[in-house]
Image (tube, rainbow, N blue to C red):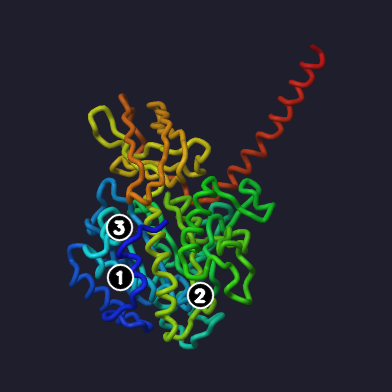
Amino acid sequence: MREAGSLCLALLLPVVAGLEFSYHHSEQLETFLKEVHQQHPSITALRSIGRSVAGRDLWVLVVGRFPTQHTIGIPEFKYIANMHGDETVGRELLLHLIDFLVTNDKSDPVVTRLINSTRIHIMPSMNPDGFEATTVHDCYYSEGRFNKNGEDLNRNFPDVFNSNNVTIQPETQAVINWIQNETFVLSANLHGGALVASYTFDNGNPATGFLQGYSRSRDDDVFIHLARTYSSNHASMYKGNECGNKPVFPYGITNGYAWYQLKGGMQDYNYIWGQCFEITLELSCCKYPPASQLQAFWNDNKAALIEYIKQVHLGVKGQVLDKHGQPIPNVIVEAKGREHICPYRTNRHGEYYLLLLPGSYVLNATAPGSGSILKTLLVPNSPENFSALKYDFVFPEVSNLARDASCPTKPLYQDFENISAAVKPTLHFLALMTVLYTVFK
């Protein structure tokens, strides 16, 4: 449930002044972001994480009590919009979200607690070239979907299931570098053309159950919760049938693969190589609706946008330390039964963040060469407190850990399949020997 109080009132009130409900082109977008940062320098940071093919800046505005750098214990959250240049609603929603956050700090308790407890990164446009190239405002398709090189950025990331033989675009590389340089915990990618919250995996193989038409991650329950959090707080997404020409989505959510298979998508990349749970939010039946509808879209989405950010505080967080209290990087920390094919490791501050629903879990911290520590924890419903459960692991003795413990960006699940296939004959042989032993005995 959402925290009651002035947020509810603020969500119901129209914007009296400030950012207008219209489409903002690149120069206007940049001007707005710079003005916000100038007016709220203590809680914002503004930077370009790279440039598009045409040389436009990829702007990110950070909102938080400590906006300029990572703070231990403060999780990193991100929203990205306009990855497809002709899907425009998300671009404007994120500008209004920025305006809503900075103008309600210190006056609205929910917004204030979010800013106190979270570092929120907002990228209004990942594909500014595509947006500027969209001259015909079409509900279904335009050339502006692609970047200036004609590439679909949501097919342009390394894929964990199949080799993705594409040239990584400047926009994609900028986001990859950004993900690797931050400790993102939760994310959403805003699209248009449907009304549904879609979650990992977008691609699949037999190891994830795709033969049943659903590609399941180890954290499927968490992803379902995240998707339903957004859809249930949206004005109508939860109905699941608002776009007449689309499938019916129960509760307004879908597994990505169950909807359609996608190779090289950003949300799967985040989950595997970024240690970040990301879902894809399709926010409008029409990709590029008239500007006159933007205020209605904002009213439909603002409660969901806020409630979704709060979910970054699900589960458990903490540090892995040595006996002197010094942080240990590259330690694998995962919940038993939820091991990732690319293990989740502590960052350079020795921090870990695990998104988990309320319940009992056994956490396993493994430092190669130094053994493992197991800890059973009862995880509460922490988003309501704006902080995950905190638990620190302490290793009495630590061997030298490898500096580079990252996983290669290759189809890791292909290796998993190959290993499984190689093991099967051995398992069959052992089973046969067991049967023969029992019979003859």
* Spatial separation of the CA atoms under disc 2 and disc 1: 21 Å
Which residue type does callout 3 highlight?
Leu
Q: Quick one: label 2 or label 1, which is nearer the N terminus?
A: 1
User: What residue is shown with label 1?
Assistant: 100
Residue 437 image position (x, y, % from top left): 77, 16
Could you tell me which quadrant the N terminus lies in?
bottom left
Circle 2 residues within 10 Å: few <14, some 14–19, many ≥20? many
Q: Nearer the viewer, mark 3 or mark 2?
A: 3
Contact (CB < 8 A) between labels 3 and 2? Answer: no
Provide the secondary structure element on which disc 2 rests. Answer: strand
**Residue 264 locus on image (x, y percent):** 53, 60
Q: Which residue is mark 3?
A: 114
Tags 3 and 1 in contact by the CB under 8 Å rule? no
* Residue 82: % across, % down: 43, 72
When the figure is inspected, residue 174 is found, relative to residue 369, above or below; the finding is below
Q: For the view shown, which residue lies furthest in the bottom direction?
A: 136
Q: State the residue position of label 2.
A: 284
